[in-house]
Image (cartoon, coloured by chain):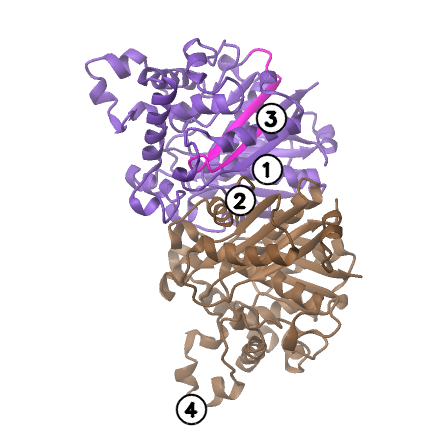
Chain colours: A purple, B brown
Amino acid sequence: MREVYVAGIGITSFSRLEYPLAEIAAYPAMLALRDAGLKAVDQVYVANMGSARINNQTALGSAVVDTLGLTPTGAERIENGPASGASAVKQGFLGVAAGMYEAVLVTGCERMREVNNLEATDFVATMTHPLAEYIYGVTLPAHAAMFTRLYMERYGVTARHLAMVAVKNHANAMLNPFAHLHQPITVEGILDSPEAFTNNPYVAEPLRFFDCCPVSDGGAAVILASREKMAELGKPLIRLAGIGQATDTLAVFERPDPTDLLAVRRSAASAFAMAGLTPGDVHVAELHDAFTILEIVESEEAGFFPKGEGHLALEKGATALGGPLPINPSGGLKGKGHPVGATGVGQVHEIVTQLRGDAGERQVAGAKVGFTCNFGGFGNNVISMVFVREE
Amino acid sequence: MREVYVAGIGITSFSRLEYPLAEIAAYPAMLALRDAGLKAVDQVYVANMGSARINNQTALGSAVVDTLGLTPTGAERIENGPASGASAVKQGFLGVAAGMYEAVLVTGCERMREVNNLEATDFVATMTHPLAEYIYGVTLPAHAAMFTRLYMERYGVTARHLAMVAVKNHANAMLNPFAHLHQPITVEGILDSPEAFTNNPYVAEPLRFFDCCPVSDGGAAVILASREKMAELGKPLIRLAGIGQATDTLAVFERPDPTDLLAVRRSAASAFAMAGLTPGDVHVAELHDAFTILEIVESEEAGFFPKGEGHLALEKGATALGGPLPINPSGGLKGKGHPVGATGVGQVHEIVTQLRGDAGERQVAGAKVGFTCNFGGFGNNVISMVFVREE
């Protein structure tokens, strides 16, 4: 296999965007092309979860190459629920690794705020088991709530730990101009103040409003290129050194222990093995904190902390900016936002920004190795990636 | 790049299927695994266009690996409108060619008859330009009708030629136990008889009922494998020797000459170049006859006949079983059916069946080189493939 590098990146603000879906994919793609110094690529992958349902549009790959004026370049849409972004990056990786393409554009997008929050929640729930979960009305917040309760009972995680994730990621998002939420919060404010019950109501007990990521529109793009192509472009050599993917049972109740996120564990282990690195080598990570509990548990399953001790590391500030392993310096899904098809590409955008040393006030000093975890379904299809800055 | 082979195939009948969508993908996948003699693969790709909208289900990749009991194997859904099937085969090719996977399962599925024909037509129309076409009410039959009218005026194609395509493909479908339509028809019956206007009404003039493919449920699967893996399996060596893809403007009216299907021309030329073969080397082809006109025009753009002369070749029987280049021995989309996400994989299923010499009464004698053309949008995203039987 050939080695694969990130040659260019681009992103929209994650927020409410009023322009058409194909343009939400095309705008960051243009930025990524400009960043790479390219006017053309050999292939386009578009990551998106809901266009057919939310936006009444299919064949989005064709729409995006057309919008970009890149025809007759080939294009596909890749869908893997909220892990669509990382799945699309994976396809781009394979095309360059195979030697079929020299440069591939991967752009992720979602325009979710076209529908109201209730419809968005129902739409997201379509990724659950259709006959064993969805028809009984389970939603992702409900799944996450049940999971959180089990985790609290088993490992001593408290509502305060969950709030710490939100506070950290909102603080990080303040340093990210592209983040959806620019709203500093405190544990006191969202848990202890007299207004907390009103400002931070329960969504699905024990999860409260500030434990859940926002519903966002947004797009993010990366250009993947071969070593030969990189030599022409003169960009920093950020190598996609490892990719791991694992699925798990679609229905959560079928798992031997539902507090184990085996797909995270397996995908991370595969990614580290492929990269020839270990969790201890990582300087910065973007994890999929659609719910606050997930950042804690993924930080364990990825191998950064022992099982059941992620909340203790969080408590000590280990995952804050300035700590030994900053997690979600971008603000994460919680603070930066979660336009589902864009999220996995946005994670790569952040890690590349960090490894290039371009992250400004949220820069993790000396970051040379980065990690991403994009979590599909309720942990039924997870992709982990390891990025390495070469000199 | 490593060479890639088809190790196994499976298909459902294309018709109305009453079982869940993930099982429509899983059933032919089981057949393909059994055909290949495999119990596991390294990756699964699911081709599907409409699950989020028609079937209220996303993240179908996860659902299919779960249904098959193949977790923790990675899986994605690939969507490229009606060319989703070939796009998924392309991803599988890249994974094996790169050396990342030894064996990949590609399964395509669609469960379209869950909605009525009007809704199915509207759903399919979501692949058109959202702002320049779809909102004005254009449908795929309407696009095809306008295209047919231009082609008739320019090249002398008549309603009789269109009917000949339908008659030929219905006749071929009679020999295919998996075909949706087992209904022999004659040109006289559908054009000249007193009942023709009733039995074969206009859908979008000049296209009549029998010029349009049916709305089908169905699934089709293939296993792609490396040369090394093939050596273990002992199956006939059918190599995926060439893949070409091309996009065109999303809005049909933006094309300099709308009677040119440039994406077909370019994708076929790329596929032949990659395979080191020419159209004259092909023994059997599966073309994307969603409307009868498309078989005629694709047979020209793929390079089998000069531009504007496809209908003359058809008239002479050149494309019938027993002719020099049988086209759509399976019955094509017209006779076999068109479950959109499965169609491109179904085309590969037929070509592999033919190159293995397993096609029974519809066998093209001595077929060693086969061609497929899977047509996305109204010609805005097309994938052509060349398959070669090695001895």
Discs 1 and 2 share one subunit: no
Q: Chain of mark 3?
A: A
Q: Amino acid at mark 1?
A: Lys
Give the CA distance from mark 2 to mark 4.
Answer: 51 Å
Residue corresponding to mark 2: B76
**Residue B328 pos. (x, y %):** 61, 71
Give the CA distance from mark 1 to mark 2.
Answer: 10 Å
The residue positioned 48% from the left and 38% from the top of the image is A248
Discs 1 and 4 share one subunit: no
User: Are the two marked residues, 3 and 1, in contact with CB atoms closer than 8 angstroms?
Assistant: no
Residue corresponding to mark 3: A386
Q: Which residues are magenta?
A: A365-386
The residue positioned 65% from the left and 54% from the top of the image is B37
User: Are the two marked residues, 1 and 2, in contact with CB atoms closer than 8 angstroms?
Assistant: yes
Q: Nearer the viewer, mark 1 or mark 2?
A: 2
Give the CA distance from mark 4 to mark 3.
Answer: 70 Å
Binning the other alpha carbons within 10 Å of mark 2 as few (below 14), some (14 to 19) or many (20 upward) gives: many
